[in-house]
Amino acid sequence: MRTLIRMFFRTLRLVLMPFMLLWAKLAMPKGVVRSAEAQQKVEAECLQLALYHFKTCPFCIKVRHEMGRLSLPITLRDAQHDAEHKAALLQGGGKVQTPCLRITGEDGQVQWMYESGDIIDYLQHRFA
């Protein structure tokens, strides 16, 4: 019975994946427009950030939409299909859960932030 349930959900994911990717692409909001100097400053700050994500995770899509709305060029790391990124997420953050924002401070300290709502709040307070 357990195997049957797993097969059902895997099949459901495979069927829904193209629709989720299409929705993620079509629903991407327009980014904010900043002056060239302000955008350069934002881009420099984004070099300290990396988002570990799964392409079709609805919570990851939500965070990527907010990144698009705020015009943030944050590095995306696919923890689903890239074993190196998955291992880094497990080693650094302690669990393979997405979305996860890796924040490197000016002092070199690394903070791992889980939960899409927390990540969105952080990005809004830092860059809005």
Image (cartoon, grey):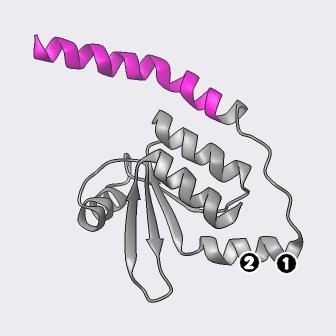
Where is residue 29 shown, x and y percent of the image? 75, 40
Where is residue 16 shown, x and y percent of the image? 48, 20
What is the three-letter code of the residue carrying label 1?
Glu
Dot 2 crowding, Cα within 10 Å, few <14, some 14–19, many 20+: few
Where is residue 80 shown, x and y percent of the image? 37, 46
Return the residue nearer the eye: 44 or 88.
44
Residue located beneath label 2 in the image: 41
Return the residue nearer the eye: 20 or 35.
35
Q: Residue furthest bottom?
A: 107
For label 1, the SS is helix
Which residue is painted at 70% across and 72% down in the image?
Answer: 43
In this rendering, the answer to whether 89 lies above or below 10 is: below
Q: Along the horizontal axis of the image, is 34 left or right of 56?
A: right
What is the three-letter code of the residue carrying label 2?
Lys
Which mark identifies residue 8? Answer: none
Q: Which residues are magenta?
A: 1-24
Label 2 with label 1: CB-CB less than 8 Å: yes
Where is residue 6 shown, x and y percent of the image? 22, 20
* Residue 52 included in the magenta stretch of the image: no
Rendered-image quadrant of the N terminus: top left
**Can residue 80 be seen from the camera position used here?**
yes
Residue located beneath label 1 in the image: 37
Which residue is painted at 55% across and 39% down in the image?
Answer: 61
For label 2, the SS is helix
